[in-house]
């Protein structure tokens, strides 16, 4: 089953010193996908609504797909190995939606493309349970992600004595 996720935040793998994107589903489950620096920058620029002077490489892919009369339908994080290597694909619709092409790619490219194009991101349900414990998210990052998930509306319901 494919589970829709959203980009929750960007983080740093404290062991490897590399960027991560934290993907979160509606139940609060998270997946930390490693990024390269250019994809992390592309996602951060989109999040901060910074427009580059010239298209980024990931933008060029989006533009090329659109110029060929197709559209990026969805991005899927499909698997993760025991050593933490993720698999992903981009699903492209062509010919007015009559033709669907699945393109294997690096997860960091897929997530950056989704972020830059507003395309939905999905994670196969099994990836949440298969993610290795040493996913690179520090306890501090886990705590921050948990705090971000708290609905602050609930705070108004309680009074301290």
Image: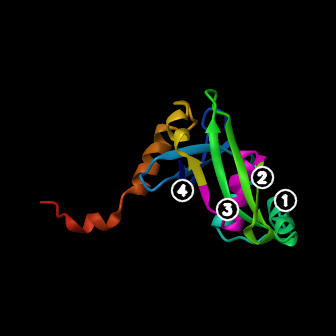
User: In the rendered structure, which disc, 3 or 4, sits on the residue that comes first in sequence?
Assistant: 4
Labels 1 and 4 touching (C-beta < 8 A)? no
Which type of secondary structure does the marked residue at label 3 adopt? helix
The span from disc 1 to disc 2 (Cα, nearest Å) is 9 Å
Labels 3 and 1 touching (C-beta < 8 A)? no
Residue marked by disc 3: 115
Which of pointers 3 and 4 indicates the residue nearer the eye? Answer: 4
Which residue is found at the position 68% from the left and 54% from the top? 111
Which of pointers 1 and 2 indicates the residue nearer the eye? Answer: 1
Q: Quadrant of residue 7?
A: bottom right
Viewer-closest of 70 and 159:
70
User: In the rendered structure, which disc, 2 or 4, sits on the residue that comes first in sequence?
Assistant: 4
Point out the stretch of residues depicted in magenta.
Answer: 104-121
Which type of secondary structure does the marked residue at label 2 adopt? helix
| Quadrant the C terminus occupies | bottom left
Residue marked by disc 4: 4
| In the image, residue 108 lies in the stretch drawn in magenta | yes
Crowd tier of the residue under label 4, counting other residues whose Cα lies within 10 Å: few below 14, some 14–19, many 20 or above: some
Q: Which mark is residue 38?
A: 2
The span from disc 3 to disc 2 (Cα, nearest Å) is 13 Å
Viewer-closest of 152 and 122:
122
- Give the x, y percent position of residue 34: 66, 42
- Give the x, y percent position of residue 16: 66, 34
Which residue is found at the position 64% from the left and 27% from the top? 83
User: In the rendered structure, which disc, 3 or 2, sits on the residue that comes first in sequence?
Assistant: 2
């Amino acid at each position: 089953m494919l589970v829709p996720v959203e980009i929750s935040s960007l983080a740093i793998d404290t062991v490897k010193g590399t960027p991560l994107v934290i993907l979160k589903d509606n139940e609060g489950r998270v997946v930390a996908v490693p990024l390269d620096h250019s994809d992390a920058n592309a996602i951060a620029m989109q999040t901060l609504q910074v427009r580059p002077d010239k298209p980024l490489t990931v933008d060029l892919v989006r533009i090329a797909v659109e110029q060929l009369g197709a559209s990026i339908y969805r991005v899927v994080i499909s698997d993760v190995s025991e050593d933490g290597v993720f698999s992903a694909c981009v699903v492209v619709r062509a010919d007015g939606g009559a033709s669907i092409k699945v393109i294997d790619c690096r997860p960091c490219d897929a997530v950056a493309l989704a972020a830059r194009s507003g395309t939905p991101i999905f994670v196969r349900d099994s990836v949440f349970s298969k993610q290795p414990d040493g996913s690179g998210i520090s306890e501090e990052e886990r705590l921050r992600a948990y705090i971000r998930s708290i609905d602050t509306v609930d705070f108004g319901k309680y009074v301290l004595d």
